[in-house]
Image (spheres, helix red, strand yellow):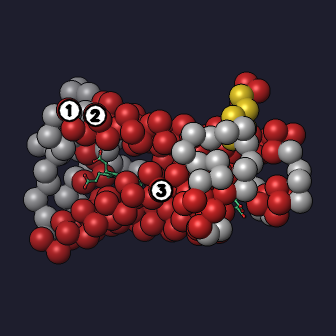
Amino acid sequence: MNFMHPSSTPHYDVLSRAFHWITAIVVTIAFILGPGGFGRLMRQGMDPATHIDIVWHETLGMLVLVLTVLRLLWVALRPAAPQIPMAPRIHMMAKLMHLALWTLLLLLPITALLALGGKAHPLTLLGGVRIDQIPLMTNSALAKLLDWGDVHGLLGDAIMWLAGLHAAAAIYHHMVLKDGVLSTMLPPKKPR
Ligand code: HEM
Ligand code: HEM
């Protein structure tokens, strides 16, 4: 594909771009591993540490939480994000989409920890890490309030739908509006 790189197009800084693409890849792999029937198996007493797809899912999902917290700190400190002129309606939609994605990036791991805590399941991570008592979560009133596993699964589906729309919007900016928005998240082209 012939990406448009007008010399005037600003770019996100390298750390913002790295956070964005690593998060996108990790979320997608965590979703693919989102093991079907996994909540049911755990309710039947299956030990999650014996299922490698669960261990990978929980490890990648917790990595998303770490990446998102570090990334939000970076958003507070980094150079201003590139400002591309666009119609106010499109600008508003982009802001709303980013807000929804940020919210889901935080809510996915939190609802997962609530799902585990409500059923007193351990958090099992790669490297044999096993946390039986998840601080603030295990057997807490909030964790027992509802079936957070169902909420978590729905939010997992929602982030993939929204990420798909967000990617389609980026491609629309590139192919139709030709305003350089997609290029802001890509590496700057080296001067020839
Ligand atoms: C950003 C990351 C994540 C995404 C996109 C995601 C996605 C999903 C999806 C789609 C399901 C439903 C699977 C099905 O029933 O077919 C699921 C279930 C589950 N995930 Fe995640 N997840 C993420 C992070 C996490 C984390 C951090 C943990 C652990 C701390 C976790 C633990 C679980 C558990 C325990 C279930 C089963 C819930 C139940 O049915 O009771 N997930 N996840
Ligand atoms: C799970 C997948 C994804 C998630 C969670 C995600 C999330 C986000 C978030 C939170 C931002 C705001 C970033 C910031 O201010 O630093 C953003 C910006 C952006 N994303 Fe994604 N993204 C995903 C996938 C994609 C894909 C596949 C594309 C391209 C095809 C893409 C293109 C862009 C672009 C061009 C921007 C900059 C938009 C602007 O500044 O108005 N993203 N994304």
What secondary structure is found at the residue carrying circle 3? helix
Q: Is residue 25 visible?
A: no
Residue visible at 66% across and 57% down in the picture: 118
Instruction: Name the residue carrying label 2.
Output: 74
Residue 47 on image: x %, y %: 86, 45
Q: Quick check: 82 above or below 192?
A: below
| Residue type at numbered disc 1 | Leu
Q: Which mark is residue 59?
A: none
Front in this rendered view, residue 1 or 121: 121
Residue at (73% x, 25% y) in the render:
127
**Amino acid tagged 2:** Trp
How far across and how far down the image is residue 19, in percent?
40, 37
Would the CB of label 3 be found within 8 Å of ligand 1?
Answer: no
Element on which disc 1 rests = helix
Judging by the rendered image, the residue that carries numbered circle 1 is 77
Point out the tag, 3 or 2, that comes first from the N-terminus.
2
Q: CA distance from mark 2 to mark 1?
A: 5 Å
Nearer the observer: mark 3 or 1; the answer is: 3
Res. 20 visible in picture:
yes
Relative to 130, does residue 46 appear above or below in the rendering? below
User: Image quarter for residue 40?
Assistant: bottom right
Q: In the rendered structure, which disc, 3 or 1, sits on the residue that comes first in sequence?
A: 1
From mark 3 to mark 1, how far is it between C-alphas? Answer: 23 Å
In the foreground, 18 or 37: 37
Residue at point 47% right, 56% down?
107
* 60 is higher (above) or lower (below) than 192: below
Q: What is the distance, in whole Å, between disc 3 and disc 2 at their CAs? A: 19 Å
Q: Quadrant of residue 81?
A: top left
Q: Nearer the viewer, residue 181 or 28?
A: 28
Q: In the figure, is residue 56 to the left or right of 91?
A: right
